Every structure is written in structure tokens, then in C-alpha cells.
Image: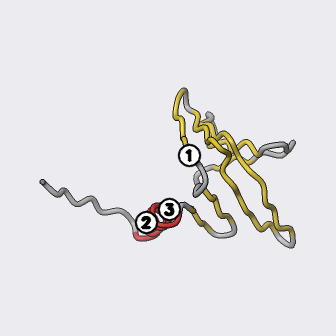
Amino acid sequence: MLDVPIKIPKQYYDMLAGLLSTGKLQHDRFTLDLSEVQNIKIADGKLEFNPAAKIKASIGPVNIKTTITTITAGPTGININIDNSPVDVEVRPA
């Protein structure tokens, strides 16, 4: 086997290693829990989770726990469709 090292910033490495070892992606006030997801479909700029992924967020004094089924790539950012909610999230580069 030929090993080819690829170096990435430590914060991204830690996020990826955490996701692979726990099934959870943590960043600042947000946790995306993929540990119960059995299938991930990627097509037409969209990720679909089955069953839905769990998400937790703390925004000021408010703590949110919900699920997400789809994430799409849009022209201005990545759109996270929060299940059963009129509010969705768009992630943009800093």
C-alpha cells in the first residue's frame, strides 16, 4: 500500500476525526449527530439523511434540538432545511 499524506489545518482534522469516531460533528455552539443515520444520499447538490440527523444549537439563551433531513448547496451558501420549522439556516464562508 502506498501512503500519501495530506496535511489539513488541525481544527478541520479534529472535526473530521471526531465525526468518524463518534458520529457527531461539533463546532462552536452546534452539534450535528449522524450516529443514527443509516443512509446518506448525495445527488443534484443535495445531501439526504435517512433517518434524519439530529442537531443541537445554543443561540443566546435559547437551546434548540431538532432534526434535519436535507442539506443543499445554494448560490450564496449551504442551506440546512430544519424539519418541521419555518426557519432554515444558511451557512456562508466567513
Circle 2/circle 3 CB separation < 8 Å: yes
Q: Is residue 10 visible?
A: yes
Say which quadrant the C terminus sits in. bottom right
Q: Position of residue 56 (x, y in %)?
A: 73, 62
Q: Residue shown at 76%/46% (left/top)?
A: 82
Q: Amino acid at mark 1?
A: Gln
Q: Is residue 77 visible?
A: no
Q: Which label sits on residue 17?
A: 2
Nearer-the-camera pick, 38 or 16: 38
First along the sequence among labels 1 and 2: 2
First along the sequence among labels 1 and 3: 3
Residue on which disc 1 sits = 38
Q: Position of residue 10 (x, y in %)?
A: 41, 70
Q: Residue shown at 17%/58% (left/top)?
A: 3
* Left or right, 14 with reference to 71: left
Q: Determine crowd level at label 1: few under 14, some 14-19, many 20+ residues with C-alpha closer than 10 A.
A: few
Q: Against 92, is 58 above or below?
A: below
Q: Amino acid at mark 2?
A: Ala
Q: Determine crowd level at label 2: few under 14, some 14-19, many 20+ residues with C-alpha closer than 10 A.
A: some
Query: Dot 3 lies on which element?
Result: helix
- Give the Cα separation between the discs numbered 2 and 3: 5 Å
Q: Against 76, is 57 above or below?
A: below
Q: Residue shown at 63%/58% (left/top)?
A: 32
Q: Residue shown at 59%/66% (left/top)?
A: 26
Q: Amino acid at mark 3?
A: Leu
Q: Which label sits on residue 93?
A: none
- Give the Cα separation between the discs numbered 1 and 2: 19 Å
Residue on which disc 3 sits = 19
Say which quadrant the N terminus sits in. bottom left
Nearer-the-camera pick, 8 or 30: 30
